[in-house]
Image: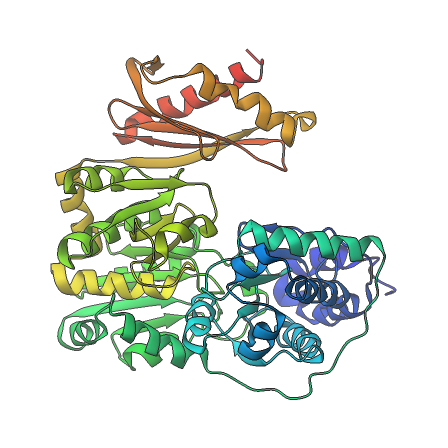
Amino acid sequence: MTRDFRDAASCWKEILSDVSKNRGLLSVIEKFARENTAPAKIVFGTSGWRGEIGTDFTFNNLRIVASAIIEMLKSKDESVMQAIGVSGFEDVKKRGIIVGHDNRFLGPDFAMEVIGILQREGIKTWYAGEAATPEFSAGIEMLGAASSINLTPSHNPANYAGLKFNPSDGGAAGAGITVKIEEIADRMMRENAVLEPVKPENIEKIDLAELYIRYINERKTLDIEKIKNFISKEDCIICIDNVHGATRGRIQRILGESAKIKYLRTEDDFLFGGVAPEPSEKNMQGVERVLRESNARFRMGVIIDPDGDRIRHADANMQIPMNYFGAMAFHFLSVYKGVKGIGVKSAGTSNLVNAIAKKLGTGVRETKVGFKNFRPYMLRSSTERAVVAFEESDGMTGYNHTLEKDAIFGLLLAIEMMAVTGKNLSGYLKDIMDEFGHYYPDRSGISVDRSLAGEQLIKKLSVIGEHYKVGAVLDIGENKRTVSDVIIVDGTKLVFDDGSWLMIRPSGTEPKVRFYIEARTEEEKKAVFEAAEKITKEALGLI
């Protein structure tokens, strides 16, 4: 296809080795993306289908996935219709589908491909342009749309593109939907289908940011006026790193322009300056620099991933990962705002929220990884409604809010926390820990022989839950700990009598075992990790 590169993967390797020097090679990637018709395995993970642009995420493969979605919608499968929340294909055509993208390379072009295919089937479409994931979720509800197709790979590196499908409740598509799309798409891939592009007949644009602003004002979980007044009147600085993503310009529209709000990385950059655009500890350096240089009484900063569904917080004293911020959000909404309900989190997330819930006389539900697993607790009709739902990997939402994770919500809630408590985030966290206990989460893992990857690894590690029952005693460093609870919703989580825990979770695709742990002191983390590794090797017959 090209003289210099045998495939898109080798071209991407060259681009990412020096993004400033090799930016011009994106034109080569576009050529691969348009001309490569090689089939790919379509897998919807915890949040959509993702693939390397020009390798597996190509225009032809996108047409196949879009066509698979349409075939699913036309299938008259009652379970699928119920999962999407529509009565049938005629209902989908009438209610319509929102299509948009984040700021990735070829995003608008990919969106036009999808819109053309949808319109050919008589489906009403709206084009959102560049928009954040939570805006799609809110927009679906505000418009009464049947679904949305968001072209984003979330926080993946620059060489990736992706597709998220959201049904009519705005949440992430569950397995009942995604498995059907995978089956149809993979059948078409096996047939080596090559589909012709379909040019859209008309483009009806929709301002999802405006719909989102109406949505949060109607839901009233957030007090936008209190947030605005705090910024206006108090000695504060808010720093927001948009990482060149789709949330740029959003906060200005919600809160108005202010010299007290500093924005980083708002310009176009398909290559993200050569960094992985995730809200990681390392990527917070720019935010931390701004906060250190300020003398304001209130200092808070965040980094948000490109599609606006993940966030990490910091103030002048420390970074505050979602393990802590999720617990803070639960305490704030429950105690200061009087929201009644339970805490909901993925199983590998800090038990600080468990301690808070226990003292407040309510409960916590732990789920598998994947925001779609929070849906049963987020619906208005839920008998157990979540005050907050969050996962260790930087995603959260709150009561009466979107069923998708929402970084904008996490930012606004953090400002409201400062406004109401009169404290910086680290001060508020200290107060919570002083009352409910100190918790120190961390994660690690080990690689195992490649022959163990997949089902065999899952099966071998399943014996851990059978071997370690409630009441079992383990040596954790120099201490003996008694197992007080065993949770097996996602791997095996052993909770000990002092509130510390370890979770052993096999990868379903890679020869790796992941460890999530939490100790009650910083010094004890090493001993908990060592116990997790010992238990794992015993289960695998390695010791």
Q: At 81% across and 74% down in the image, what residue appears?
A: 196
Image position of 121 with respect to 191: above or below: below
Task: Kindly indicate the quadrant of the structure image that contains residue 461.
Answer: top right
Image position of 91 with respect to 364: above or below: below
Q: Where is residue 472 in the image (x, y as percent from the top left)?
A: 34, 13
Image position of 261 with respect to 532: above or below: below
Q: In this view, does 6 lie to the left or right of 539?
A: right
Image position of 531 with respect to 252: above or below: above
Q: Where is residue 295 in the image (x, y as percent from the top left)?
A: 18, 65
The image shows a total of numbered marks equal to: 0
Q: Position of residue 275 (x, y in %)?
A: 53, 57
Q: At 85% across and 56% down in the image, what residue appears?
A: 191
Q: Is residue 154 visible?
A: no
- 277 or 366, nearer to the observer: 366
Q: Is residue 178 visible?
A: yes
Looking at the rendering, in which quadrant would you find the N terminus? Answer: bottom right
- 321 or 165, nearer to the observer: 165
Looking at the rendering, in which quadrant would you find the C terminus? Answer: top right
Task: Kindly indicate the quadrant of the structure image that contains residue 156.
Answer: bottom right
Q: At 25% across and 74% down in the image, what residue appears?
A: 260
Task: Kindly indicate the quadrant of the structure image that contains residue 53.
Answer: bottom right
Q: Is residue 87 left or right of residue 321?
A: right
Q: Position of residue 521 (x, y in %)?
A: 25, 30
Colour basis: rainbow
Q: At 39% across and 81% down in the image, what residue appears?
A: 210
Q: Is residue 70 left or right of residue 192?
A: left
